[in-house]
């Protein structure tokens, strides 16, 4: 019997209950350290690390069954976590009234031009690899275009920071930026939108692959995503 897409999602991404509960308990323990006057960024970083074992378990399970779909899953989850950091920046600016220049997100120590450049280079590199593994996924091609532009932005921002010693400049399209004075958007808002669009497109591209698995289950009774057969199809 053919599974619906929600059923396929649940089947492929079963939560290991023990690992999930351990991550929850560790996170609660980390939150309690705020009472000990630990800095917010240190607590947030430790909470993120507490969920890493769960991600490893789920990724390993996916790889055993569907091979390189697991890599797709890692990119979707990691970029989603990065988007959460930008969401917190928006809360700082528009809810808490923090000036945009001081809104550094939860893990403020990582809010540097080098970190942003490395992160976006990682997303771009992984998108290229995924396009090789899933060449018929047209949504990934759109992700690639957005990711290339986003990486160009951060390459220029890193260049500016290295040559001026100033971080947080508007870049290419931020308000006051190099290209025509930029858009009427502050840099934090613009980069929130960049990351939101990237994550939304990645989710659509990932769902496309899940639909292929569902169709494969219906046709052959076994799920074989495109990435698992790409080498075979090219021989």
Image (cartoon, helix red, strand yellow):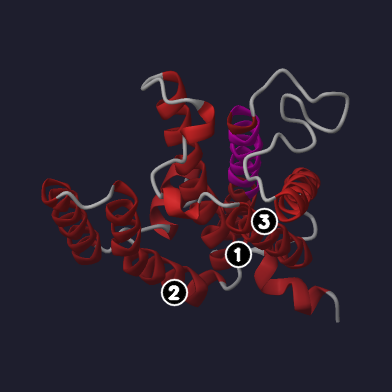
Residue at 71 percent across and 58 percent down: it is 127
Please say if the residues under marks 3 and 1 sit with CB atoms less than 8 Å apart: no
* Residue 173 visible in the current orientation: yes
Is residue 25 part of the magenta span, yes or no? no
Name the mark on residue 114: none
Answer with the quarter of the image where residue 233 lies: bottom right
Q: Give the position of the C terminus as an image quadrant.
A: bottom right
Q: Where is residue 65 in the image (x, y as percent from the top left)?
A: 50, 73
* Residue 223 visible in the current orientation: no
Does residue 46 appear left or right of residue 133 in this picture? left
Report the magenta residues as a range.
Answer: 189-205
Cα–Cα span, label 1 and label 2: 24 Å
Residue at 68 percent across and 38 percent down: it is 169
Q: Position of residue 7 (x, y in %)?
A: 42, 47
Does residue 43 appear left or right of residue 184 in this picture? left
Please say if the residues under marks 1 and 2 sit with CB atoms less than 8 Å apart: no
The residue pinned by badge 1 equals 220
Q: Earlier in the sequence, mark 3 or mark 1?
A: 3
The residue pinned by badge 3 equals 117
The residue pinned by badge 2 equals 60
Residue at 47 percent across and 28 percent down: it is 90
Mark 1: secondary structure: helix
Q: Which of marks 1 and 2 is nearer the N terminus?
A: 2
Cα–Cα span, label 3 and label 1: 43 Å
Q: Which of marks 3 and 2 is nearer the N terminus?
A: 2
Q: Please tell me how crowded label 3 is: few (under 14), some (14-19), or many (20+) other residues with Cα within 10 Å.
A: some
Q: Is the magenta stretch mostly helix, strand or loop?
A: helix
């Amino acid at each position: 019997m053919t599974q619906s897409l929600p059923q396929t999602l649940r089947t492929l991404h079963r939560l290991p209950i023990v690992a999930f509960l351990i991550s929850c308990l560790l996170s609660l323990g980390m939150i309690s350290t705020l009472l000990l006057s630990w800095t917010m960024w240190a607590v947030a970083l430790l909470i993120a690390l507490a969920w890493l074992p769960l991600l490893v378990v789920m990724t390993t399970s996916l790889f055993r069954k569907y091979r390189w779909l697991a890599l797709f899953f890692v990119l979707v989850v990691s970029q989603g976590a990065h988007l959460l950091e930008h969401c917190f920046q928006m809360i700082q600016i528009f809810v808490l009234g923090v000036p945009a220049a001081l809104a550094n997100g939860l893990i403020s120590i990582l809010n540097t031009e080098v970190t942003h450049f490395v992160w976006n280079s990682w997303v771009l590199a992984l998108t290229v690899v995924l396009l090789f593994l899933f060449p018929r996924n047209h949504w990934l091609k759109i992700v690639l275009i957005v990711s290339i532009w986003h990486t160009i932005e951060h390459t220029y921002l890193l260049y500016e920071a290295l040559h001026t010693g100033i971080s947080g400049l508007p870049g290419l399209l931020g308000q006051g930026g190099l290209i025509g004075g930029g858009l009427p958007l502050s840099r934090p808002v613009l980069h929130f939108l960049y990351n939101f669009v990237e994550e939304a497109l990645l989710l659509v591209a990932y769902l496309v692959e899940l639909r292929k698995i569902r169709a494969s289950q219906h046709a052959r009774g076994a799920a074989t995503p495109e990435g698992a057969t790409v080498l075979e199809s090219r021989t």
